[in-house]
Amino acid sequence: MKKLIAVVFALMVPGMALAAGPSVPLDEAHVDVTNEAALQRGAKYFANYCLSCHAAGFARYNRVGRDLGLTDEQVEKYLINTTDEAGDPTKIGSHMNIAMSKEYGAEAFGAAPPDLTLVARVRGADWLYTYLRSFYADDSRPFGVNNTVFPNVGMPHVLWELQGIQEKVVRTEVDAHGHEHEVTELELVESGTMTPEEYDQMVRDMVTFLVYLGEPAQTERKMLGVWVLLFLFVLFVFAYFLKKEYWKDIH
């Protein structure tokens, strides 16, 4: 019995640790996957800044374009930046893969950049939103940056020209009970091409696209769920009166 309890506890510990959540408070992303304009902007930013190193290998360009209200010509012009083995532009029916091999990625970054098709389902929208806004200068790291949400991350801050450069500031505060505690903040020391508000909106748009990418049919699924519930309600009404008809002589 003790061994059984130990095994059950061992299996529960990883789930408990995961449920505990991150140690850094996350900002709410407030994404809306029904916002077609935000999805289109997010797809553009994703193609320009992420799709060089990170694949989205479970998605196809033409499906993404169709869901986002883009024509095939717009997808080819704004989203496809790669070529096939023959050097021709990647076909619109292809998966959203990259030219960089996993071996080269592991050599360049220490670990191969992960596929991002399902990253929003694994990490969550709030985690992604906070992560992409939490890079700061750190000369001890290979690429000169670190991240408060993902410490010692191997990814460079590819959006630094847009956001600018942040520095990590740790200060001591005294709460109402007289207890001292450290507060970590990120301060913008060098401005980018976007204002902080514009950068936050850009990140939100990109996260919106990643949330869509993790489950392209989620909007249809939710609408179908509403119709299913309505059908079950109507069925319940008929079943209730049918039950009363069958049992009227008994009751």
Image: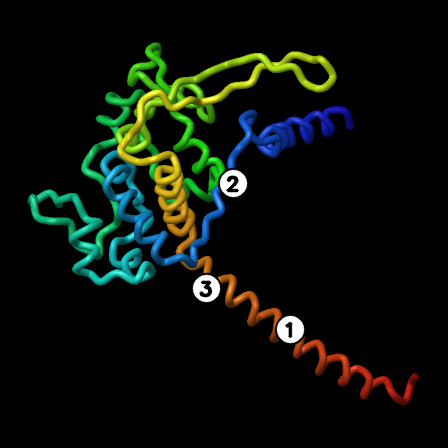
Q: Nearer the viewer, residue 51 or 107?
A: 51
> Residue at position x 40%, y 43% from top?
204
Q: Residues within 10 Å of mark 1 (few under 14, many from 20)?
A: few
Amino acid residing under circle 3 = Glu
Note whether 35 is above or below 49 in the view shown: below
Count how many numbered circles sit on residues in the image.
3
Discs 3/1, front: 3
Quarter of the picture containing the N terminus is top right
Query: Mark 2 — residue?
Result: 28
Q: Earlier in the sequence, mark 2 or mark 3?
A: 2
Cα distance, mark 3 to mark 1? 18 Å
Alpha carbons under labels 2 and 3: distance apart = 24 Å
Image location of residue 97, percent across then percent down:
24, 43
- Of helix, strand and loop, which one carries label 3? helix
Say above or below: 180 vs 39.
above
Query: CB under 8 Å between callouts 3 and 1?
Result: no
Residue where numbered disc 3 is placed: 220
Q: Residues within 10 Å of mark 2 (few under 14, many from 20)?
A: few
Relative horizontal placement of residue 34, taking residue 240 as reference (left or right): left
Quarter of image, res 112: top left
Residue 173 in percent (x, y) is at 61, 15
For the residues carrying marks 2 and 1, which lies nearer the camera in this image?
2
Q: CA distance from mark 2 to mark 1?
A: 34 Å
Mark nearer the viewer, 2 or 3: 2
Type of amino acid under label 1: Leu
Q: Which mark is residue 232?
A: 1
Residue positioned 35% across, 17% down in the render: 137
**Which numbered disc, 2 or 1, marks the residue that appears first in the sequence?**
2
**Residue at the spot 37% in from the left edge and 48% down from the top edge:** 209
